[in-house]
Every structure is written in structure tokens, then in C-alpha cells.
Amino acid sequence: MKALKIAVFALVVVAVGCINITVRVTFPEAQFQAAADKIVDKVQGGAQEKPKNEGGPSSALPQPDWLASFSLISTAYAKETAGGNIDITIENAEIEAIQERLQKNFEEYKPYKDNGSVGENLKGYLEERTEGSSKLESGDQKSLRKLIKRENSDRKDLYMALLEANGYDKSQLSKIEEIFAKSWYGKSDAAWYVRYNDPDEGLIWLTRAQWDEKQNAGENP
């Protein structure tokens, strides 16, 4: 009897181990992208010029493998299999509070976007554009850098809060950063600057209008 119990236990361990290795679910990129678009619209007031190529410069962003392994008891796995079509949560007290901070930040950094001192990078965060910021007074440069640091901290808080609210952990952070990069980028005004990964020059700054020209000309690195 004891030998039988040991054998059964061993089989269970092996079976569970195999299941945990083979279970893979699709990260709900499309649902998170729709949520990101809504949030960026809200933060920016929906007042920005509609880009020619709505949805953002996907070719300029990394193209990751969106499949990720999860434990058999993962909340994400349960949401995927139980509901089929995942409904992304974008409203709770924490997320709404962060969005309010982002709206206030936007009012402060928009002038710096307008004058070319700051732009969007490919990882979903603000980045100083020295070609523009070098023209600022020393005090304004310091204020800009503090603002960039505060904004990027709030953005990371938002990304983490969205993941947590929807049953995902920080291992998925890079994915949601890339998703938001597409939204920040895709909803930029034509004159705002964005990072572009040029195949010859590496990372360079382009205005959104310049990006459109490259894309329309068939340049698709």
C-alpha cells in the first residue's frame, strides 16, 4: 500500500510539472492596446491632431514574442480560459489617481514638447531631447528634468497598476511599456518628437510628420 501511495504521488508530481511547463497563454495585446489608447486620450484631453497612420509606428518598436508562460493557477490563465475575451480593467481608485497626476504633468510638459525639448522614446517614457533643451535657460532645464523624472515614475506606476488590476505581474512590464509607447507615439502631434530606430543611424529623433513621410515613402525598418 505504501509503495502504491508513493507511485501515485510521483505520477501526480510529474503530471503537474508537465502541465506547468506546457501551459502558455496569449498576452492580450489588442485589449491592452485599446485600453492604452483610451488612457492616453484622457491624459492628453483628446485634443491632439489625429495622426495619418493611427495606431502608432509599430515598425519602429520592438516586435516581441507575445506568448508567456504562466503557472497553472495563474490569475491570467484563469481569466483567459474562463472568459475567452478578456475585459481589461482600466478604472479603479489607484489607476484613476495616477491618471489625474498624468493629466497635470501633461499640462506642464506640453510646452516642452511644443518647443522640441522632450519627446517620446520607444519604451513608453519621456526622454529629454538635448537639441531642444540646450536652448533653454539653466533653471528651465532643471525644471524639465525633474518633470521628466516625475512623469516617468507616474507612467511606470500606471503600467504596474494596470497589470496588477488585470491579474498580471511585473514580468509583463516590458510588454505593456511597448504597448503604451505605441499609444504615446501614435497620438503625438505632427510637430512633436519621437525616437526612431533608423537602420543606418541608430536611434534618432524625428517629428511625427517626418515619421509619416518615411513610412509613406516605404521606409520600414
Image: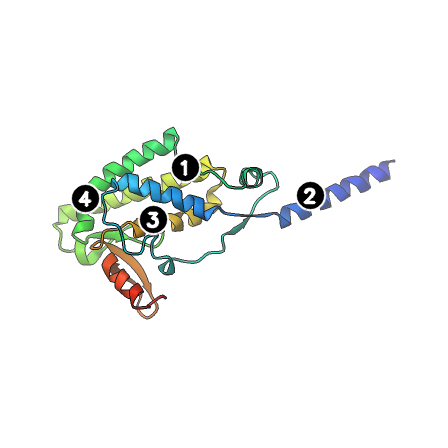
Determine the CA span between mark 2 and mark 1.
Answer: 31 Å
Where is mark 4, residue-wise? Answer: 143
Amino acid type at image mark 4 = Ser
Whether residue 218 is visible: yes
Name the one closer to the observer, 55 or 40.
Answer: 55
Determine the CA span between mark 4 and mark 1.
Answer: 27 Å
Residues packed near mark 1 inside 10 Å, few (<14), some (14 to 19) or many (20 plus): many
* Residue 220, above or below 187: below
Circle number at residue 16: 2
Amino acid type at image mark 2 = Val
Determine the CA span between mark 3 and mark 4.
Answer: 25 Å
- Label 1: state its secondary structure: helix
Name the one closer to the observer, 42 or 195.
Answer: 42
**Number of numbered tags placed on the structure image:** 4
Determine the CA span between mark 2 and mark 4.
Answer: 54 Å
- Label 4: state its secondary structure: helix
- 215 left or right of 66 in image: left
Circle number at residue 183: 3
